[in-house]
Structure formats: structure tokens, C-alpha cells
Amino acid sequence: MYLVLEGEIVVSTTRVETMLGDTAVAVHPLDARYKSVIGEHVWHPFREERVPIICDDFVNPDLGTGEHNTVFI
């Protein structure tokens, strides 16, 4: 779970250890659940730092929680 100023974004994963490498949380740009937080930041629960919320058409809003934790290289 990533904390947002006004709530939270639940990241659905079966491998929590991969969250250590997350550099963003991606949401679909047309997903109404997350439209108001695109461009905001969440608090990374392990590294204790801000991580941006970005939008990407790759994210399937009908799968799981409708978001995708992302690593940029």
C-alpha cells in the first residue's frame, strides 16, 4: 500500500520484495478511480521517499487494483 495525501493506493503484488525497486506507480489515464491523483506523489513504504503517480495506457484498469508499480531504468 502506498500512502497518498488524501488516502491510499493499494498495489496488488504477489512479490512484495519487488517494491524495493519501484520508482513510480502507473495508472491508466482514463481510470476514474485515479484521475485526481495523476501527477501527485505517494510515500514509498520501504524506502521512505516520495514516488510519482504517472499515467500509462499500458495499465489494464480491469485487472487487479487497476494500477501498476513501475521501475524505470
Image (spheres, grey):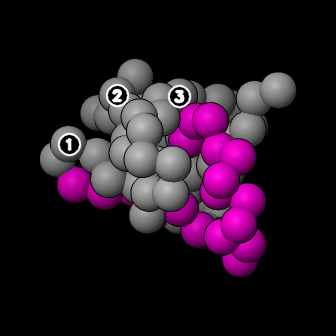
Q: Is residue 37 above or below residue 20?
A: above
User: What residue does disc 2 label?
Assistant: 40
Give percent across and percent down for residue 56: 64, 30
Q: Give, as a three-letter code, the residue at label 1.
A: Leu
Q: How many dots with numbers?
A: 3
Residue sticking out furthest to the front:
47
Q: Give, as a three-letter code, the residue at label 3.
A: Ile
Residue drawn at x 29%, y 33% as measured from the top left: 36
Q: Is residue 27 above or below residue 63?
A: above
Q: Is residue 3 left or right of residue 71?
A: left
Residue 54 badge: 3
Disc 2 crowd rating (10 Å Cα; few below 14, some 14-19, many 20+) is: few
Q: What is the spatial separation of the Cα atoms under label 1 and label 3, in whole angstroms?
A: 16 Å
Q: Give, as a three-letter code, the residue at label 2.
A: Glu
Q: Is residue 48 magenta?
A: no
Q: Secondary structure at mark 1?
A: loop
Which circle's residue, 2 or 3, is located before the other in the chain? 2
Is residue 14 visible from the viewing direction of this image? yes
Q: Secondary structure at mark 2?
A: loop
Q: Quadrant of the N terminus?
A: bottom left
Residue sticking out furthest to the bottom:
14
Residue sticking out furthest to the left:
6
Q: What is the spatial separation of the Cα atoms under label 1 and label 2, in whole angstroms?
A: 9 Å
Q: Nearer the viewer, residue 48 or 14?
A: 48
The answer to whether the residues at label 1 and label 2 have Cβ atoms under 8 Å apart is: yes
Q: Is residue 50 left or right of residue 21?
A: left
Residue 5 badge: 1
Q: What is the spatial separation of the Cα atoms under label 2 and label 3, in whole angstroms?
A: 8 Å
Q: Which residues are magenta?
A: 7-26
Q: Is residue 37 above or below residue 4?
A: above
